[in-house]
Amino acid sequence: MSDVENKIFDSYAEEYDSLQKKNLGVLGKDLTVFSQYKIKTVKRIIQNQPKTFLEFGCGIGRNIPFIQEFFPETQITACDVSQKSLTIAQKTNSDVNFFLIEKHGDIKSAINDLDCILVSGVMHHIKPTEHKEWLEELVAVLGEKGEIFIFEHNPYNPLTRHFFNTCPYDADAALIKPAYCENLLSKCGIRSCRRQYTLFFPWRSPFWENLEWFLGWCPLGGQYCVHGSKA
């Protein structure tokens, strides 16, 4: 990622939540929905209780409280290219190990032998020419049975496309198709890649969440999850 991209993320760090609420309108009333459902999905899919967990591209740390809630015994590490975002995240998550990414190789230098990696809404901000290099580095720091989860906006959902096209911090980004993510993970050494369409409903309850899980095959969810393991 370039210095220009880092500065862009820095510039939005303090107003990230307010910008997203404004962009989503009535659907952005409770932003925790978008974080909590992802970690619940990971919890439902993951094969083993992770001892170590990395969030790659953690931003201001909105997912971290839910990682702590659903994986209370797990050692959590998080990283980002934006120092301002990490500073904000650290204020409310003092027991998490944060580190700054400035170049390729920084992840390998900081951590290794991970049980789980989360990449949430990050890939569309990375230049396509760098996708494989970053994923190869992430896969390299996974343990023998480590699992990786990539959440992205679903380009097949018209409402998602509208929100994406009107979001100021996505102005230079491009939506990514799930098949592309699957193929990329396979090329990087991940086996048994699977796709799950998610976020069909903005309201949450056990009923709607179970229905959403049942509809995971349907390519109309607001987002999707591609996941797999090294083993």
Image (spheres, rainbow, N blue to C red):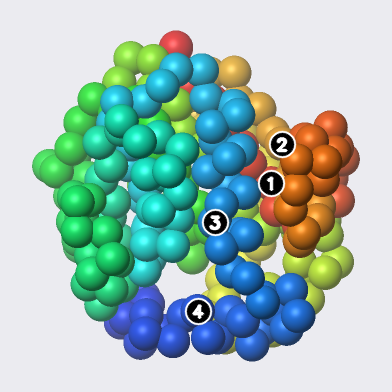
For label 2, the crowd category at 10 Å Cα-Cα, with few meaning under 14, some 14 to 19 and many 20 or more, is many
For label 3, the crowd category at 10 Å Cα-Cα, with few meaning under 14, some 14 to 19 and many 20 or more, is some
Q: Say what amino acid the circle numbered 4 marks.
A: Asp
Which residue corresponds to the image point at 59% horizontal and 69% vertical from the top-left?
Answer: 31
Quadrant where the C terminus lies?
top left
Whole-percent x, y for residue 190 in the image: 48, 24
Q: State which tag comes first along the sequence, 1 or 4.
A: 4
Do the residues under discs 1 and 2 have CB atoms within 8 angstroms? yes
Which residue corresponds to the image point at 49% horizontal and 65% vertical from the top-left?
Answer: 125
Q: CA distance from mark 3 to mark 1?
A: 13 Å
Is residue 103 at least partly visible in the picture? no
Which element carries disc 3, helix, strand or loop? Answer: helix
Do the residues under discs 2 and 3 have CB atoms within 8 angstroms? no
Q: CA distance from mark 1 to mark 2?
A: 6 Å
Do the residues under discs 3 and 4 have CB atoms within 8 angstroms? no
Q: CA distance from mark 1 to mark 4?
A: 21 Å
Whole-percent x, y for residue 204 in the image: 74, 53
Q: CA distance from mark 2 to mark 3?
A: 16 Å
**Residue that carries the numbered disc 3 in the rendered image:** 35
Q: State which tag comes first along the sequence, 4 or 2.
A: 4
**Residue that carries the numbered disc 2 in the rendered image:** 196
**Residue that carries the numbered disc 1 in the rendered image:** 224
Question: Which numbered dot is residue 19?
Answer: none
Question: Which numbered dot is residue 17?
Answer: 4
Closer to the camera in the image, 71 or 200:
71
Q: CA distance from mark 4 to mark 2?
A: 26 Å
